[in-house]
């Protein structure tokens, strides 16, 4: 996410770090490179120019040149202005109605149907929300089928009617169904086109007028850059939507849409999609995104993702098992599943300050745990419960069954034993012993 932009901004700001004395000349040189980096990221030239002019005014106004650490102060000003450019504060969705009605809009291929499911899953996990997904794309039966597949995957009801060709009637029937069945959020997935056209605009305007949603969201593919911003403006001029959803931020996106869309349509980015999984949805925090663009990581979001997967009852159960030396491979598998739900590994690494830069040329496979899982699943239930049973002949069988080698099985067993000992020491407060063990593992 934003790798190219992050690199270019880092190089631009490094110009200041390389000078013993900071002058107006090298500040201007730095900001010229910042502007070029933004334009290369598909930010509109006028927005990029206004941005660097504002940074320059603030830099000179805050006596950056006389500061003891001018490069650090400059980075802070750039970060603050990036945050403001992307919206300043995070904004959630309006769920004031009963049911709350959310209308999804956007072009075909933007990820609208998938994101409708992600949003339903996100709200469902808030415990008090019972969402209903509504299929209002009357032109593509495949879109209706896709929404049903998504709904089944996340355990959310989907309302559809393939016989009805009027999307307004489908939406109204769905809302009546939600009211009758105690479903308090209605998410309406509408038809998209390959480009903005009058028929699509008339149709979604009719739906909007008929159902009066609390929230109208525009879903846009972040990989389309400035085109995404132009399409958002066309939709906003007609719909006056409430917020933007940026999808596919895990892809090869230059970042222009995320940075400049707020200043063009004056509507906040509310959520971002960062992967294919239903859990790959984040509230958009402009300040955190600015941190990530500038290579500072996003520890807060990382902790929040971990907390979402944290189960207190499961943690207590594990503590008891660890205390009794009964932590087995089934428990280990559950921990792996929790980590996988947090998102793709490269995205998680990017949230750790400095790690994103170190790992940028490293190909981190999203199936990094695949061979570990294969080895564990090739064990018998007794072997998973009690790994000390695994002798040479069992290792050969496990290796053959998992498509791995005996060496890989041995390596996993060794790492598992070391990890189990460390977990035991952490419980017992054996800090010195644990430090010594970590040295031995190097």
Image: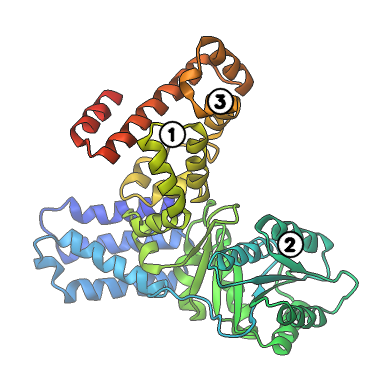
Picture disc at residue 382: 3
Q: Residue 411: give x, y in percent of width and height.
A: 44, 21
In what element is the residue under mark 1? loop
Residue bearing mark 1:
327
The colour scheme of the drawn protein is rainbow
Q: Which mark is residue 420?
A: none
Q: Residue 22's quadrant in the figure?
A: bottom left
User: If you read the primary sequence from the N terminus, does the residue marked by circle 2 or circle 3 appear first?
Assistant: 2
- Please state the horizontal and vertical placement of residue 114, each as a whole percent of the image: 66, 60
N-terminal of the pair, mark 1 or mark 3, is 1
- What is the C-alpha distance between the residues marked 2 and 3? 41 Å
Q: Label 3 near label 2: C-beta < 8 Å?
A: no
Q: Residue at x 56, y 58 (%)?
A: 223
Q: How many other residues sit within 10 Å of disc 2, few (<14), some (14-19) or many (≥20)?
A: many
Q: Which of the 4 quarters of the picture holds residue 435? A: top left
- Of helix, strand and loop, which one carries label 3? helix
Q: Is residue 376 above or below residue 140?
A: above
Residue located beneath label 2 in the image: 147
Q: Is residue 34 above or below residue 390?
A: below
* Camera-side mark, 2 or 3: 3
* Cβ atoms under marks 1 and 3 closer than 8 Å: no
Q: Residue at x 44, y 62 (%)?
A: 39
Disc nearer the start of the sequence (1/2):
2
């Amino acid at each position: 996410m934003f790798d190219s932009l992050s690199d270019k901004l880092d190089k631009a700001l490094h110009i200041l770090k390389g000078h013993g004395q900071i002058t107006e000349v090298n500040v201007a040189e730095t900001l010229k490179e910042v502007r070029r980096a933004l334009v290369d990221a598909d930010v509109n030239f006028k927005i990029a120019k206004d941005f660097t002019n504002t940074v320059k005014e603030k830099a000179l106004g805050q006596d950056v040149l006389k500061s003891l650490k001018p490069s650090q102060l400059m980075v802070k000003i750039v970060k603050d202005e990036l945050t403001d450019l992307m919206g300043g504060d995070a904004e959630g969705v309006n769920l004031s109605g009963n049911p709350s009605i959310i209308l999804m809009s956007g072009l075909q291929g933007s990820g609208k149907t998938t994101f409708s499911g992600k949003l339903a899953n996100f709200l469902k996990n808030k415990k008090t929300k019972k969402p209903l997904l509504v299929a209002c794309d009357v032109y593509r039966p495949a879109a209706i089928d896709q929404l049903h597949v998504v709904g089944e995957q996340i355990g959310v009801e989907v309302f559809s009617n393939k016989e009805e060709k009027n999307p307004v009637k489908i939406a109204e029937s769905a809302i009546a169904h939600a009211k009758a069945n105690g479903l308090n959020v209605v998410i309406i997935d509408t038809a998209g086109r390959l480009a903005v056209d009058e028929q699509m605009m008339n149709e979604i305007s009719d739906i909007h007028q008929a159902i009066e949603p609390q929230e109208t969201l525009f879903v846009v593919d972040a990989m389309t850059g400035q085109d995404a911003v132009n399409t958002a403006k066309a939709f906003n001029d007609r719909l006056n939507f409430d917020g933007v959803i940026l999808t596919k931020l895990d892809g090869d996106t230059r970042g222009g849409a995320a940075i400049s869309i707020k200043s063009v349509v004056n509507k906040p980015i509310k959520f971002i999609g960062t992967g294919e999984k239903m859990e790959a949805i984040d509230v958009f925090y402009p300040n955190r995104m600015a941190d990530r663009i500038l290579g500072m990581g996003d520890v807060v979001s990382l902790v929040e993702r971990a907390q979402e997967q944290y189960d207190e009852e499961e943690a207590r159960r594990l503590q008891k098992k660890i205390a009794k030396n009964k932590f087995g491979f089934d428990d280990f598998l559950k921990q792996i599943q929790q980590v996988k739900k947090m998102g793709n590994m490269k995205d998680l690494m990017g949230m750790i300050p400095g790690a994103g830069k170190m790992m940028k040329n490293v190909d981190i496979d999203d199936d990094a745990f695949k061979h570990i899982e294969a080895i564990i699943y090739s064990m018998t239930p007794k072997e998973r419960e009690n790994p000390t049973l695994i002798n040479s002949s069992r290792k050969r069988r496990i290796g053959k069954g998992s498509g791995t080698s005996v060496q890989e099985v041995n390596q996993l067993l060794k790492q598992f034993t070391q990890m189990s000992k460390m977990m035991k020491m952490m419980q017992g407060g054996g800090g010195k012993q644990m430090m010594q063990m970590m040295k031995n593992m190097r």
